[in-house]
Image (cartoon, grey):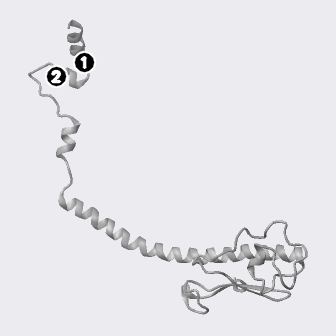
Amino acid sequence: MLEEMLRRKLGLLPDDERNHGSSSMKRPRSRWWRSATSGFTLIEVMMVVLIIGLLLAVVVPNMWGSVDKARVTMTKQGMHRISTALEMYRMHNTHYPSTEQGLAALVAKPGGFPEPKNWGPEPYLPKLPLDPWDNEFVYAADDRSFEIISLGQDGVEGGDDLNADIRFSEI
């Protein structure tokens, strides 16, 4: 008891223990009590909601445009990946796959004419690629060149903006 009195006089006890024993001093209110009674006014909450709404009105439309641009970029990158695989196929077999053999010739050894002489040993692509709109790429080839086409968002030849065809020869 004497030790506790000394500590109290010297200020060595924590605040809540120091004031607990004396009846002449008011006990300070705890943080819990202050946080339970403090809060935001309705106007403050409405202002925050208004600011968040304005930010969303500006940011969301810009993000949608970015998503569309990203799909076009992904389509072009996919075409470059297919082009690289076609060049590897040509180096091994002296020709591109025919239009009839298609891009499937990059995934599995094709049959038909022209027959690949040195196909493989591994596939040139792990699976048949799709564009970002889940449409198959259109492939056409002759002896010396090829064309890869994505039909765009609508999957139909022609169109404008996002529905426009993307051609590898125009990249």
Q: Can see residue 84?
A: no
The image quadrant that residue 76 belongs to is: bottom right
Please provide percent x and percent y for residue 4.
22, 11
Q: CA distance from mark 2 to mark 1?
A: 13 Å
Q: Can see residue 58?
A: yes
Judge left or right: residue 122 versus residue 156: right
Q: Which mark is residue 11?
A: 1
Please provide percent x and percent y for residue 69.
56, 77
Q: Which of marks 1 and 2 precedes in the sequence?
A: 1
Dot 2 amino acid type = His
Q: Quadrant of the N terminus?
A: top left
Q: Which mark is residue 125?
A: none
Task: Report the front residue among 97 and 26.
Answer: 97
Residue at the spot 82% in from the left edge and 89% down from the top edge:
142
Q: Which mark is residue 20?
A: 2
The image quadrant that residue 97 belongs to is: bottom right
Judge left or right: residue 29 versus residue 129: left
* Residue reaching furthest to the top: 2
Dot 1 amino acid type = Gly
- Does dot 2 land on a helix, a strand or a loop? helix
Judge left or right: residue 143 versus residue 106: right
Q: Are marks 2 and 1 in contact (CB under 8 Å)?
A: no
Residue at the spot 25% in from the left edge and 19% down from the top edge:
13
Please provide percent x and percent y for residue 128.
69, 74
